[in-house]
Amino acid sequence: MSRLFGTDGVRGPANRLLTPELAVGLARAAAERIVPTGGRVIIGRDTRISGPMLEAALASGFASAGIDVCLAGIIPTPAISYLIKDERADLGAVISASHNPPDDNGIKFFNRLGMKLGVEEEAAVEASIDPAPAPADRVGTIAPLEAAATRYAAFLSGAIDVEHVDFSGTTIVVDCAFGATAKIAPHVFRHLGASVIALHDALDGQRINQGCGSTSLEPLRLAVRQHGADLGIAFDGDGDRVLLVGPDGRTIDGDHMIGIAALHMAADNVLTPPLVVTTVMSNIGLETRLAEDGIEVVRTPVGDRHVSQRMQTTSALVGGEPSGHIIFSEYASTGDGILTAVKLLEIAHRQGADLVELARSIPLFPQVLRNVPCTSPAALAEDERVQKVVARERERLGTSGQILVRPSGTQPLVRVLVEASDEAECTQIADEIESALRNASG
């Protein structure tokens, strides 16, 4: 793995780790490695206050390398994936730190197929960063991409058959996390006939993801109860992930969504091949339930990029992560929160059932997640003292669950996942591993 790129692009504190100078260097390096001379790149961003600064730097870097730049403005990450293919552009770049706090930001690149760059491509870009590059033969143009958000919204609305699916009579609370979905998601659901209550729908980069959105579901649960809504929908800051909340406050996570979609498609005889792609973080309960209907679960390392790449090689139609990155490959090459919510509502409508009812048919094992802050996540996760405790707890758990301890690819954390049939046992094992991590970090 390269030093700058993590599991989802380059990410860190804006103007400290992620500086304008680095953005220029990344743009020029990406132009050298990926974009043909005279090619085009589309740039989008979320609402963070550092976004315009990094947008200007990234655009300048591409233009100085002779690449024409189309600025899509504030727009969800998956919109860039869609627009690359629609515009036949050579590359896409998104300036966003997804679910991270407001002071962070990030840069991730998408190839001409709308897929995130692979590890080897990112390493090649990083290796090509030159502090004193030779001037290009031409200067690229920089111009707005006209009607970018409108075109993306039209694509989302067209993902279902509106003549046969009508969301009228359905009340939805939509939490936009002060992020990139704020001016698009409520519009799409209203266009499809739903009554929409929008939360945190200001374009406010100083509050993005703060106590709202997919990382903080309590405000959404409260609003769903207050309004007697049928469903709550929570996006993260850049709109590539989504979590759902039922009228009873129950969370419908990514594993539930993958299961609901796969079972529906299998019943319609369109899940060909009969498999889904998930990561090692997905719940064993999902795998057990899908196996009952002859559906295979293929697992990848953590990261929706790995899911997307495996879906391409296996021709899978559905895949994703428990965090709510869900990919419907018939429509998109990357996780798309709004598209996922639209498709799940369509499935519920066609089955004449609510999503909570459908989620209950996929019983998941109890899971406990812990995040341990540290300065060197990779070193801490591999610490001999930590590994000794993890091995002991894995032996104790046996085949009745799973334990994952890994450095975060997006934040200075070690993430711990414990899954077992007994919740008390999950908590006890997580406590032991968290204690070992904190003791080893000193």
Image (cartoon, grey):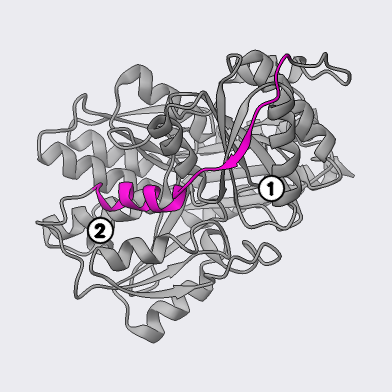
397 with respect to 120 (left or right): left
| Position in image of residue 251 (x %, y %) | 41, 62
For residue 71, above or below residue 196 = above
Q: Is residue 298 above or below residue 368?
A: above
Of residues 197 and 272, the one nearer the viewer is 197
The picture places residue 134, in percent across and down from the top left corner, at 82, 13
Looking at the rendering, the stretch of residues picked out in magenta corresponds to 137-159
Type of the residue with mark 1: Glu
The residue shown at (70%, 24%) is: 139
Sequence-first tag of 2 and 1: 2
Q: Residue at x 25, y 38 (%)?
A: 290
Q: Nearer the viewer, residue 58 or 108?
A: 58
Q: Which residue is mark 1?
A: 432
Separation (CA) of disc 2 from disc 1: 40 Å
- Amino acid at dot 2: Leu
Label at residue 354? none
Instruction: Say which quarter of the image contains residue 185.
Output: bottom left
Q: Is residue 321 left or right of residue 53?
A: left
Q: Secondary structure at mark 2?
A: helix
Mark 2 or mark 1, whichever is nearer to me: 2
For label 2, the residue is: 345
Quarter residue 289 falls in: top left
Depth check, front residue: 143 or 77: 143
Place of residue 26 in the rendered image (x, y in percent of width and height, measured from the top left): 73, 27
Residue 213 seen in the current view: yes
> From where the camera sits, is residue 412 visible?
no
Mark 2 in CB contact with mark 1 (< 8 angstroms)? no
Residue 129 falls within the magenta-colored stretch: no
